[in-house]
Amino acid sequence: MSADELVISSLSAGYPGRDVIRAITLAPIRSGQVTALVGPNAAGKSTLLRAISGVLPATGDVLFKGRNLLRLSPRSRAALLGFMPQNVPQGAGLSVLEGMLSALHVGGSTSADPIIDQAVRVLEQVGIMDIALRPFSGLSGGQRQLASLAQSIVRSPPLLLLDEPTSALDLGHQLDVMNLVRAYVAKDRIAIVVLHDLSFAARWADNIVVMAEGKLQAAGPPESAITPAILQSVYGVRARVERCSRGCLQVIVDGRVGDSSEGA
């Protein structure tokens, strides 16, 4: 196992009295790659990210950079990963820039001038410098999402966990975010991203992990993980998986399993 790989073995997590994910084991995730987590609602995708990040207590092993993330202190873990949650908090009056500086302090940075410069660079990179001084509570859902993304990457962590980073964004900003993620992992980093749009996931991810009911259903390159049989089993739909004129996989849903109509 390479130290730059993320290895997840027998990972289980949940809430008091209720397991959500059970004994998840994945093939090693290599640096330089984007892995998309997909699956129906309540499949366990967000729980898996929360378990990896340490937000949610978990059992099993999450090995990265020669260390088990589940055994690290919050400060040590913060040096290795950035986590963007699905539900972005409104921030209790903090401005976007103040949130960025707080994230840098959590990561161990203490000198004021360098961290301000670093925060400004990332705000410009994400394209939200114009809202730097605005409070989180006054932002739209899409703006909060972009601000949360900026917070998650400001420390340049080698492991990036993003829970539905494009859900509140228009098409142009979705493109911007995924271009940024691809550029980010190109610097020998790893990104795990929860996405709902399967065609979108197939376009941007190197690997797809399909989950349902807290269990792994399929994993691998898009063409092997997204198939009509898997879509029928996991989503209960009749679907075609075809390539567009540019060679990208497209998922076309024709109907529910058992529904005789041909409309989609």
Image: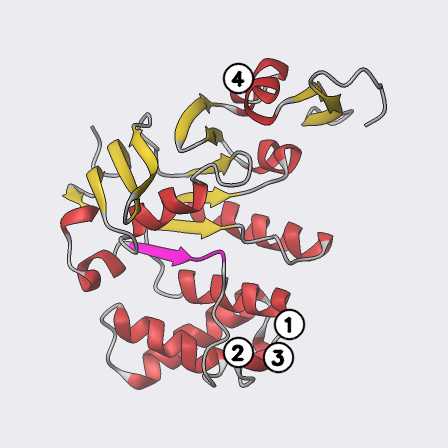
Mark 2 secondary-structure assignment: helix
- Amino acid type at circle 1 is Ser
Reply above or below: 107 against 262. below
Q: With 166 as the anchor, is 80 left or right in this view?
A: left
First along the sequence among labels 2 and 4 = 2
Q: Which residue is mark 2?
A: 136
Q: Which residue is mark 3?
A: 130
Q: CA distance from mark 4 to mark 3?
A: 42 Å
Disc 4 versus disc 3: nearer the observer: 4
First along the sequence among labels 3 and 1 = 3
Query: Image point 71% across, 56% down: which residue?
Result: 170
Q: Quadrant of the C terminus?
A: top right
Q: How many marks?
A: 4
Q: Is residue 5 visible?
A: no
Query: Image point 57% across, 48% down: which residue?
Result: 178
Asked whether residue 248 is drawn in magenta, I would say no
Q: Quadrant of the N terminus?
A: top left
Query: Image point 53% across, 78% down: which residue?
Result: 136
- Amino acid type at circle 3 is Asp
Mark 4 secondary-structure assignment: helix
| Camera-nearest residue between 6 and 209 | 209
Badge 1 density bin: few <14, some 14–19, many ≥20, Cα 10 Å: few
First along the sequence among labels 4 and 3 = 3
- Amino acid type at circle 4 is Ser
First along the sequence among labels 3 and 2 = 3
Q: Which residue is mark 1?
A: 140
Q: Which residue is mark 4?
A: 224
Q: Are marks 2 and 4 in contact (CB under 8 Å)?
A: no
| Residue farthest front in this picture | 17
Residue 240 position within the rendered picture, expressed as x and y whole percent measured from the top left: 71, 18
Q: CA distance from mark 3 to mark 1?
A: 14 Å
Badge 3 density bin: few <14, some 14–19, many ≥20, Cα 10 Å: few
